[in-house]
Amino acid sequence: MPSLDGSVVLVTGANGGVGAHFVHDALARGAAKVYATPRSPHARDDERIIPLTHDVTDRASIAAAVATAADVTVLVNNAGAIPPSASLLDVTEADIRANMETNFFGPVFLARAFAPVLAAKEGSILIDVLASWYAFGGAYSASKAALRSATNSLRVEFAPVGVHVTGVHMGNVDTDMAAHADRPKMLPTQLMTTVYDAVEAGEYEVLADELTKGVKAALSGPV
């Protein structure tokens, strides 16, 4: 089974919120090192955390991350962005394209770039944070749904070389990113326990809360 124990992890979007919990909970499960890769890194109080400036929308930044973190065994595609509006009709074309760059193209190109690194190490893991199916987020929902499809394709392509791919679906998590939402929110610590437990159990998909389970169950019903 995949394991975090002794792993070397790279987490995108790691400055705060869910990303910060991905970092610290990986260490709590025995990770030897975690590359924390926000656009503007800050100093850490744990020598096992390696700050690494990274922009998922910049191809040169992706190449630099691969060159620096060639020992990675777990890649967590967590970085994400929300467009100015949840409407596909009201936002600008630039807003839609920018959201797709962060939420879809960035994770896909990062996975492609790290593919040789992950494939070369036994027990490697790719975790994609998706949060798709819920269609009321405009460009955000569309980009995450596209990433879910890409995650399924990557799972098929990575399987022959032994890289385990897990997609994470959840509703609102109690972080700054969801501060505007008035629906119930799960704690980041609850999310991390659910995600890492699922990964280490060899599961391919995480439905982290009851909202997500309900939405998936309704997909077979009428539009």
Image: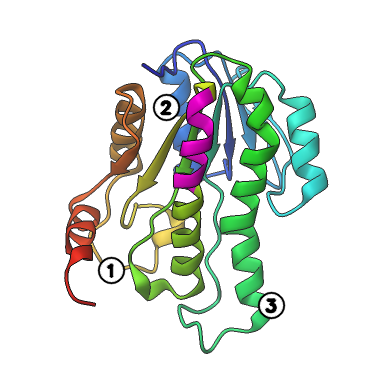
- In the rendering, at what x and y percent does residue 8 appear? 58, 19
Q: Where is residue 180, by image quadrant?
A: bottom left
Number of disc labels: 3
The answer to which of 162 and 90 lies nearer the viewer is: 162
Instruction: Tell me the kind of residue under disc 1.
Output: Asp
Query: Picture coordinates of residue 182 (x, y %)?
Result: 28, 68
What residue appears at the point 25 percent right and 55 percent down from the top-left corner?
Answer: 212
Please tell me whether residue 55 belongs to the stretch shown in magenta: no
Which one is closest to the eye, mark 1 or mark 3? 3
Identify the mark nearer the N-term, 1 or 3.
3
Residue 145 in the image: x percent, y percent? 44, 61
Identify residue type, mark 2.
Asp
Q: Secondary structure at mark 3?
A: helix
Q: Residues within 10 Å of mark 3 (few under 14, many from 20)?
A: few
Spatial CA span between label 2 and label 1:
27 Å
Pointer 2 or 1: first along the chain: 2
Check disc 1 and report its element: helix, strand or loop. loop
Identify the coloring: rainbow
Is residue 20 visible to the viewer in this orientation of the structure? no
* Of the image marks 3 and 2, the number of the one nearer the N terminus: 2
Q: Which residues are magenta?
A: 151-160
Location of the C terminus by quadrant is bottom left
Q: Is residue 202 left or right of residue 158?
A: left
- Badge 2 marks a residue whose secondary structure is helix
From the image, tell me which residue sits under label 3: 94
Q: Residue at x 71, y 25 (%)?
A: 69
Q: Residue at x 77, y 52 (%)?
A: 58
Image side of residue 4 versus residue 57, left or right: left
Q: Main secondary structure of the magenta part?
A: helix
Residue tagged by mark 2? 25
Name the residue carrying label 1.
182
**How much space separates mark 3 and mark 2, taking CA atoms?**
36 Å
